[in-house]
Amino acid sequence: MRLTDNPAFAKLQAHQAELEAQSLPALLQDSDRQQALSLSLDDLCVDLSRHKITEETLALFAEMAEAADLKGQFEQLFAGEVMNHTEGRPVLHMQARTAETLQGDEGRKIAIFTDIIRGDKSVKDVVNIGIGGSDLGPAMVTQALAPYHDGPQLHFVSNVDPSHLHDVLAKCTPERTQFIVTSKTFTTQETMANAALARQWLVNAGCAPDRQFAAVSAAPDKAEAWGVEPDRIFGFADGIGGRYSLWSAVGLPIMIAVGTTRFYEMLKGAFDMDTHVRTAPARQNLPMMLGALRVFYRNIHHKSAYGIMAYDQRLKDFTRWAQQTEMESNGKSVDRDGRKLDYFTSPIIWGEAGTGCQHSFFQALHQEADICPLDILVPLRPVPLYRDPAWQKSHKMLVINALAQAEAFASGKDSPEEPHRQFDGGRPVTFMSWDATTPYALGRLLALYEHITIASGFLWHVNSFDQFGVELGKEMAHALAAVGEGGAMPSHFSQSAAVLLAALKDAGTDS
Ligand code: F6P
């Protein structure tokens, strides 16, 4: 069902007209508000009280979720039905976090390899070469779980800019470095270019690259043809989309960093969120309510951006991961039946870690006339639990800053005498907190954002599982590369492109 055909959407529009007259700072005076507008799953609390909404709004969100049969659609997804219609595939990343998958042949093969690499003290550095979903998830999680690292040092190289690989290799010793080439297709230009450079680096140092490369791919034949030994190739199902793949063999760098036990704890957190999305009634269902909130801001408030600020330094790349998850999934303008949409879908997802953001772009968020809704995320306790009271105090300061910002955005402060000091308030914030960023809590959080993406995609009636929008640029890069190798300029390229190509040809190679 298209969003504009959803009867609850029209009700929500009418309801918004009533909300217009209200003031968020005034609504926040209600002492029952926090409890009435909060959702939770164990220690994960999602406080929606700093949005200009009421209990009726949440009831309408639930009605909209029910009218679009989100529960039924999630069930179809979990049942392995073909939900990626354009590519004729099921959506299988949730299956990667089940005990059956872990105990299967591929799951055991990865666990054994992980133990071998972790136990091999000659391996000092592990470099993952991959891009997009083959990089953002594993890199973000590896960083998020830094306190649990007890394996070799992990590095991630994604950009075809040779400086990226160069600067990582400068920290590594050829004989003591293991490479993982992660690519679902094993054809991605950037990844293949970096993998070839890395192999040459080993050869130049007199190493035998065969035993120093592993591959993770849904196209194992291509990895083998490239030269990776079959016992070092780890596959995953075609139905696992790149941006949803960190739970599968794509998580190999995470497993090497923290071990399989911690990795499985993370999967358990995600599995529990899967159970929640399948079983909780719409009004209590975190992904469904937060998916409806995305729609509320995009299609009722007409907001084109949504900020995610994690007050957890180790989650500094969380927003980049969520950005790919949401924007690559829902940045579409045709519906699941191929019909042009007459409403917008994915907002621009952006943001970075607190508290740094407070000292840069938060100025605009506090005082600019255009308002951007935000998620502020914070763990209440640090990992590890610092013994020194001064360190504990710093973590408390972090949480207090997160809270202070949420309060300032929502409540504001009047300054009639000095307009430059005026804070209107009424700026919406979802305040999300949990006990501590353990592997379990992290898995639960990531699965929550995946399911928010899927729930909002269902409401928008788009296919959240294809990404044809990335194709044209790739095709053009291949065509331009052929021109660079002496081919003729295809007629569909502009004169501007020809000018730049000529300049590239003339550019010297020495500095
Ligand atoms: O170009 C986009 C994309 O296809 C993403 O969807 C994917 O995560 C990334 O490139 C990397 O693709 P691969 O894993 O096939 O190298």
Image: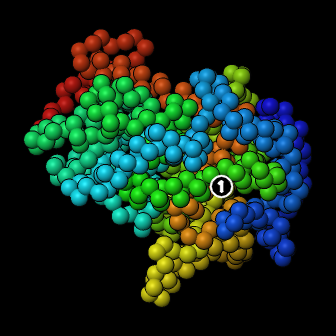
Q: Is residue 340 above or below residue 157?
A: above
Q: Position of residue 386 (x, y in %)?
A: 46, 81
Residue 304 sits in quarter: top right
Q: Position of residue 171 (x, y in %)?
A: 21, 55
In the image, taking residue 18 as reference, residue 160 lies left or right, namely left
Question: In which quadrant will I find the N terminus?
Answer: top right
Q: Residue at label 1?
A: 272
Q: Amino acid at mark 1?
A: Asp
For image coordinates 23% across by 58% down, the residue present is 121
In the image, taking residue 240 as reference, residue 452 lies left or right, namely right
Q: Is mark 1 within 8 Å of ligand 1?
A: no
Q: Is residue 18 above or below residue 68?
A: below
Neighbour tally class for label 1: few under 14, some 14-19, many 20 plus, Cα within 10 Å: some
Q: How is the image coloured?
A: rainbow
Give whichever of 278, 358 is nearer the camera: 278
Q: Position of residue 124 (x, y in %)?
A: 24, 57
